[in-house]
Image (tube, helix red, strand yellow):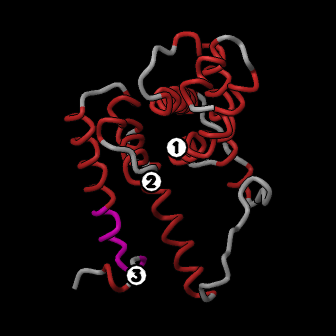
Amino acid sequence: MDEDSLIRSAQRGNMDAFNELVLTHQNRVYNLAYRIMGDPAAASDATQDAFISAYRHIGTFRGGSFKSWLLRIVANRCYDELRRHKRRPATSFEEFGELDEEANPALINGSASPEEEAEQTELAAFLQEAIATLPPHQRVVLVLSDVEGLSYTDIADAVDVPVGTVKSRLARARAYLRDRLQARGELLPAVYRLE
């Protein structure tokens, strides 16, 4: 079935149709949650909560982009969780040196040398850390645009703001990341370094 048929069927209570929608969108929803939260476990929780909320409220979906509707739900869930963490900070096991290899496995494709792999890992960690320091409204827009590849219009629908606001938030987020990367130029591959 096409997505519109699956949505209509899910709205009539068909769990299999909703599960098909979940399978179609789960990677994108998780990726957004991970980029916002910066933690695999928190991203998994936010993703699960978003799909539960979507299931409970699918009857309120009135058309348009289902993907944007889902991304708005997960972004709002992540915002709620970030606000909760701000009120009640917690220390994760990772900060104590414990690594959950199942939740965050090292994916190595074998084509990079150990030195290149270490450099890429360091750059990725730096970028994720820098993204995590962005204000949540800029972080969401950056991830939806530069990681997920959504258009300005789709992002505006997903976060429920005008396109102009999306563009300005994205410009500020990119400028911030650029400045952070230039300050740590040694992390950039040689072809991207400013001479």
Q: Tell me the element at label 1.
A: helix
Residue 32 image label: 1
Dot 3 surroundings within 10 Å: few (below 14), some, or many (20 or more)?
few
Q: Are marks 1 and 2 in contact (CB under 8 Å)?
A: yes
Q: CA distance from mark 1 to mark 2?
A: 8 Å
Q: Amino acid at mark 2?
A: Val
User: Mark 3 sits on what residue?
Assistant: 189
User: Left or right: 104 with respect to 82?
Assistant: right
Local crowd size for mark 2, using a 10 Å CA cut-off: few (<14), some (14–19), many (≥20): few
Q: Residue under label 2, please give it.
A: 147
SS at mark 2 in the image: helix
Residue at 33%, 43% (x, y): give it: 151
Judged from the image, the secondary structure of the residue bearing numbered disc 3 is loop
Q: Mark 3 is on which residue type?
A: Pro
Q: Are marks 2 and 3 in contact (CB under 8 Å)?
A: no
- Residue 11 lies left or right of residue 103; in this view the side is left
**For residue 180, which quarter of the picture?**
bottom left
